[in-house]
Amino acid sequence: MNDLTRPRVIGQRTPRIDGEFKLTGRAGYTGELHAEGMLYGYPVPATIAHGKLEALELDEAQAMPGVVDIFHHGNFDTLHRSPNSMGHGDQVSEVRLPFEDETIHYHGQYVALVVAKTFEQARAAAYRVVARYRQASGAVPSLLGRDDEGLPIESEGSSRGDPEAAFSGAPVKIDRTYHIAAESHLQMEMHATLAEWHDGGRRLVVHESTQGVVYQRNAMARIFDLAQEDLEVISHYIGSGFGNKLFMWPHAVATAVAARRLQRPVKVVLPRQQDMMSGGNRPASRQHIRLGAGRDGRLTSVIHDSITETSLVDRYIDSCGSATPSFYACDNLAVSQRILPVNHGTPCPMRAPGEVSGIFALETAMDELAVELKMDPVELRLRNYAESDPESGLPWSSKQLDKCLQSAAERFGWDKRNPEVGSMRDGDEIIGYGMASCTWFAGRQPCQARVELRADGSLFVGCGTQDIGTGTYTIVAQTAAELTGMPLADIEVKLGESGLPSGPLSGGSMATASTLPAVAAAVRDALDALKEVATGNGGAFEGLSADDLEVGQGGLSHGEHRVSFAEVLKTNKLASVNGQGSTAPGAEQNAYSFRSFGAHFVEVRFDPGISRVRVARVVSSMDIGRAINPPAARNQVEGGIIMGIGMGLFEQLEYDPRDARLINSNVADYILPTHADAPEIDVELLDYPDFEFNEFGARGVGEIGLTGVAPAISNALYHATGKRHRDLPITIEALL
Ligand code: MOS
């Protein structure tokens, strides 16, 4: 029963246990929640990107129907900045508090919060707030188009051997620079907060659409100087977050202050425009890659220097080179990272942060090297295959990239590729085939969980992680079902409350590997408690020892004698038994290197007559350890592929070069892939459970699908057209 090497529920296609709630509209997302007496807030965003707020004229707005109050620098509460420490779990996305001073650092920075009886009234009044600014010169609109050196970030560097000497002596060299535009997360559900104070302002309950209820609880406790017990952050259903909901933003603080001052619940749902201006972005990057290789294709030097944007108020580091040291076997390597402050809202992690940008540059450069060598790009990657982690020197826990490359190439029909540029045609269209490898680290965080086995025949599991739409509710239920033999319908899962035992962020593709071991430990602890009851005085198996009992099908048994968990409890007149689980990464972290790998093969079709490119087909193979719920895992990779098409061909936040204002803060002008842009997608998940990482064999799957997609597209376009694209997105203009 407890043998996770041969599971019955884990690894099986399992319909989402919350699916019906979502499809019938009963799942309450933060923006839809209502509290008795609730008021609505609407932020007023700065209309300049650099300067000072000189005056706010509020009379007209104040007189608008339904307006209750307007909060701003002149009347805001004094708060404490969060120490903003990842280690202490109180990290925030923007450390500056709302309305802290009158300096404007970016377009969209809040200058006021209007609170009114209805959303429409708050919005109408917000438009009547008149802000007078003194605009400063010298706004920095973007990293792109500039050659600033920025600030070095030593902690993100890596080096081995003598890369400069090896590069200058290399028989074959690639020396190229790559640019990627800033992108918006555009998660379906906008940032939203509903704050409510209880007990005369001593206790704060916050509903937030967040990837980390515990982090937000910790940060808010510091900001409002509250004990953690006096603060609860709740996030039961989340319309996704791609890193922009990992850590709290200032709108949540402003909402909680308004609720305290007005002694009424207040809700703020950011409009899409503000979500794009002040709710996080993937920063633009400039990357310089130098590869040195022998004629046989073996890399002799890899040098990867990156610079990415941060804001004027925070130091966000999008570490582009973080996968590079582990990617290929090469004795000489240097990776460096810099950041440049620009007048944007603070950037933040966005699905496979850093690595996805770095892999675009590295995997495009590898394709350029393959062309230079006249070598098949798959063969080039196999020649430089890293059999152990070249960065740490540790063995991989499990690495099946070679199988990914072989399997995806075969299913794609890579052997039908004529390597000659522009040689494959179908009517008016030129067909291009391209590929790239991809990777994402496998991480694990400490986690706690609790379980109740109840006399009504149900099992309750609670954990302070959250389900951001990826399927965490379901895999937690699968875990409890696996270990007890109970049907999924009898298992109740509660996530998304900071008052539950501390759970991990839903981020970094770490939630699965962090959460399931703690849930399993809590289930086993509850089963041990139940066995103790069963074998003790008056118990259903009185006189036997716990070791004599088998667990299965929701009951305990000894030989032919089987008693359901519920009957065991009823026999002793108990309502429930409880179990606790607390797990953390352990000694395995020093014994192995943990990474997922994969490969994407892409077919593009280019019609030169009208400069139209379509991604027609993507065939991918992923080595993620075991997939707990395969359709949900595959869905993550498919979503990543669509995001990769956006990154490759469409998406860019455009900032006015004159004054750094964001131009396209809406989904009409910010171009996204639509259904019509979606290719045929064929994703295979290899099944090599990684038992060195955890007993479930799962490494997680959220982000890897996005890595490697954009370079596979640009490599396919080169094959079709002979034109090398080193800047993303590859717009129609760039294709002309
Ligand atoms: Mo991911 S960038 O950790 O949501």
Image (cartoon, helix red, strand yellow):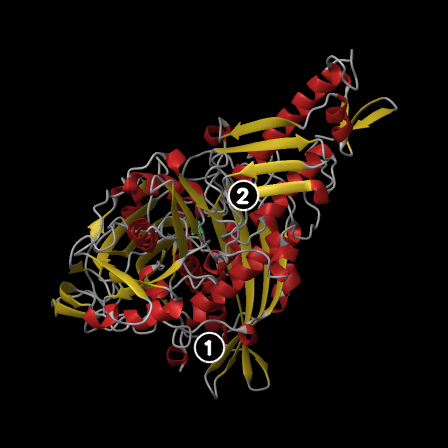
Relative horizontal placement of residue 210, taking residue 562 as reference (left or right):
left
The response on whether ligand 1 sits within 8 Å of label 1 is no
**Of tags 2 and 1, which is closer to the observer?**
2
Front-most of residues 506 and 462: 462
Residue of label 2: 495
| Residue 731 vertical placement versus 97 (above, below) | below
Q: Secondary structure at mark 2?
A: strand
| Residue 543 vertical placement versus 591 (above, below) | above
Q: How many marks?
A: 2
Residue of label 1: 721
Q: Are marks 2 and 1 in contact (CB under 8 Å)?
A: no
**Residue type of the residue flagged with mark 1:** Thr
Relative horizontal placement of residue 54, taking residue 322 as reference (left or right):
left
Q: Secondary structure at mark 1?
A: helix
Res 144 seen here: yes
Res 652 seen here: no
**Residue type of the residue flagged with mark 2:** Leu
| Residue name at image x 71 percent, y 33 percent | 484
Quarter of the image with the C terminus in it: bottom left
Front-most of residues 521 and 342: 521
| Residue name at image x 54 percent, y 45 percent | 700
Callout 2 crowding tier (Cα within 10 Å): few <14, some 14–19, many ≥20: many
Residue 199 in picture, x, y percent from top left: 38, 40
Residue 329 in picture, x, y percent from top left: 44, 44
| Residue name at image x 19 percent, y 74 percent | 658
Callout 1 crowding tier (Cα within 10 Å): few <14, some 14–19, many ≥20: some
Q: CA distance from mark 2 to mark 1?
A: 50 Å
| Residue name at image x 48 percent, y 82 percent | 612
Front-most of residues 494 and 352: 494
Sequence-wise, the earlier of marks 2 and 1 is: 2
Query: Which of the labelled discs sits on residue 39, or is there none?
Result: none
